[in-house]
Amino acid sequence: MIRYDLICDHGHTFEGWFSSSSDYDDQAGSGLLSCPACNTPKVEKAIMAPAVKTARKVEARSEKAAKKAMSMVAAKIREEVSKNCDNVGENFAEEARAIHYGEKPSRGIYGSVTDEDSSALKDEGIEAHPLPDAFVPDPPKTKLN
């Protein structure tokens, strides 16, 4: 497919897609082309810059695509954490201990913990891993009075 920038004799610009350059020539010669703004059949190719792929453009697109993919993955993880885990806030260490020692039912939790509590949990053999900020669900919105 070939994309051409087109312009009518009234100055309206638009684009057209053709299977080949001869396809454009055939349609233009047969009067099959018309301006979508004013319907005039007097349409010709506009001057266009060639679409050249440079390494920078390819790299920029790849980087943008990677960021978008990571953002989508992070959103999915946030959704899963929000659905399947309880935010226990600053009570994380206490809740983790209660679950570990069977005082509370086993469930997924997340929250915040001090470095000291994190070290103590590790010393007690309680597995707790930091959740990257990008994966932490947004807090629920509260109504303002």
Image: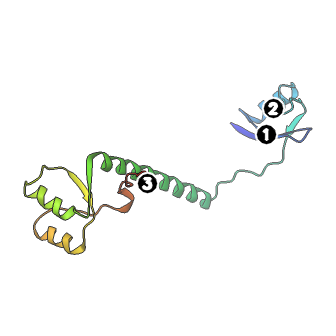
From the viewer's perspective, is residue 127 above or below residue 117?
A: above
User: Residue 99 versus residue 129: which sits nearer the camera?
Assistant: 99
From the viewer's perspective, is residue 72 above or below residue 36?
A: below
The residue under label 3 is which amino acid type? Answer: Met
User: What is the x, y in percent for residue 141?
Assistant: 41, 51
Q: Earlier in the sequence, mark 3 or mark 2?
A: 2
Q: Residue at x 39, y 53 (%)?
A: 74
The residue under label 1 is which amino acid type? Answer: Phe
Q: Is residue 120 left or right of residue 39?
A: left
Q: Which mark is residue 111?
A: none
Q: Residue at x 8, y 54 (%)?
A: 103
The quarter holding residue 120 reads bottom left
User: Residue 138 versus residue 49: which sits nearer the camera?
Assistant: 138
Q: Which residue is mark 3?
A: 70
Mark 3 and 1 residues: CB-CB less than 8 Å, in contact? no
Label 3 element class? helix
The alpha-carbon separation of the residues under discs 3 and 2 comes to 40 Å
The residue under label 2 is which amino acid type? Answer: Pro
Q: Which residue is mark 1?
A: 14
User: What is the x, y in percent for residue 99?
Assistant: 13, 55
Label 1 element class? strand
